Amino acid sequence: MEKRSSFGSRFGVVAAVGGSVVGLGNIWRFPYIAGENGGGAFILVYFIISLAIAVPILLSEFTIGRRARSNARRAFTKIRKYGKWGWVGYLGIATAFVIMSFYSVIAGWSLEFLFSALFEGFTNITSAEMGDKFSLFVGGAVRPLIWTITFILLAVFIISAGVEKGIERYNKIFMPLLLVLMIMLAVNSLTLPGAKEGLSFLLKPDFSKIHPSTLLQALGQSFFSLSLGLGAMITYGSYIKADENMFKVGGMVAISDISIAILSGIVIFPAVFSYGISPTSGPDLVFITMPVIFGQMTGGYFIAILFFFLLFLAAITSIVSLFEVVTAYLTEEKNLSRKRAARYVAVALTITGSMCVLSQGDGTGFRIAERSLFDWCDTISATVMMPVGGLLIVFFAGWVMKKEVFRNELTSEGRYGKRIFPLLYTLIRFVIPIVIAILFLDQIGLLKLVK
Ligand code: PHE
């Protein structure tokens, strides 16, 4: 057997894991979810939930991965020799696939918009025109298909180059670039006339806006944003070196994730308020509202290019981690070479991704119970597959793994984080499973917290 790869340096680990967590979830999903849920109040809840729930799950995934030093499917049965746990691994692989299927479609849009920004610009386009343009593009299958496939091929290119020479290397270039772009865009936004209003919407919590639904939305968002519940972090964890301080890595990554989400808010909301647009325009915020705004902004031509390039960077580094879940499984369990495994994943993903694209045309797309396959993938992964996966993973960490084994691995044999371990372990064993279970029961409608 080949020697198993690992990430080379602390910066490499943080860049790779950061690349996975920072994605469309931060730039496309977070602003519109925060916008719909009252801005500042939502962000506060999100912050608390990320630290108290999401980070402990992230650390559990790292620990399982590093302990087993294997792909997410094998990890469970390697630690606990009971065949049934392998199903959690399979569930994770399936979830990765479902997410990739719609994620590659939205990522494809970012490429289309990047090219639109470059060659046509959005000068003086109105909301209605932009809306039409967008529906025409999404409904007309060929262009979205080409972009989705282009995006998948780029991911294959990175994955095929390996853990250190592919994933780590590109993340080390793309992540700092992303951060620089983000800061440039945020600074630009702060100079807009509506900046003050935008900022106070974003940062001043209005507690009357906190409902049970805010909590549930925040929990779902933090799962998606920190790439949890499907073994992506188990897989990346398996490449973390034994003496690395996982608390530090987890902390740095969580802070980056939250900061980038808030920075996206700073990029988007001042602009939204300057141009008198409602902050609650939903998933279209990035693809319809923002181009309209760029079309009116001084220097908007360049800002638009930077923005969509940023979106593309964020998406590619995330999909690579989803790809790796399946690729690692195929190379280690089915004895395929990395290149061949990546190609197989790409072929399968091209099929499911294309189905998602084609399911979107108005009237022409195929629907299951009134919804497109694209919507189904988005909804099922976030509301069912990730919470169930997360619940099982955290249960495995807290109740199935022996406490000493878990503690020794997480703390690198007692070297780091010994003092916060007891608190963390209590969260993992009791608090988190209960909270996720409640969320899940609510989402599938068995328990009605929110009307
Ligand atoms: N965290 C990524 C984002 O915010 C999405 C993702 C989910 C990536 C699950 C990997 C695994 O866009």
Image (cartoon, helix red, strand yellow):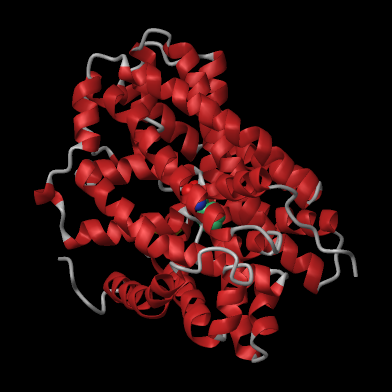
Quarter of image, res 218: bottom left
In the rendered image, the vertical position of residue 7 relative to residue 387, given as above or below = above
Question: Residue 120: x and y, percent?
Answer: 51, 14
Q: Residue furthest right?
A: 1
Question: Residue 147: x and y, percent?
Answer: 62, 36
Quarter of image, res 271: top left
In the rendered image, the vertical position of residue 371 relative to residue 438, given as above or below = above
| Nearer the observer, 211 or 99 | 211
In the rendered image, the vertical position of residue 5 relative to residue 448, given as above or below = above
Where, quadrant-wise, is the C terminus in this rendering? Answer: bottom left
| Nearer the observer, 222 or 134 | 222
Q: Residue furthest bottom?
A: 82
- Determine if residue 143 is in view: no
Q: Residue at x 75, y 49 (%)?
A: 8
Q: Residue at x 62, y 43 (%)?
A: 15
Q: Residue at x 59, y 28 (%)?
A: 177
Question: Residue 400: x and y, percent?
Answer: 53, 87
Q: Residue furthest top?
A: 298
User: Does residue 159 appear left or right of residue 44 in this picture?
Assistant: right
Question: Residue 430: x and y, percent?
Answer: 36, 80
| Nearer the observer, 140 or 236 | 236
| Nearer the observer, 249 or 140 | 249
In the rendered image, the vertical position of residue 87 relative to residue 418, given as above or below = below
- Determine if residue 310 is in view: yes
Q: Residue at x 81, y 72 (%)?
A: 334
User: Does residue 128 appear left or right of residue 41 in this picture?
Assistant: right
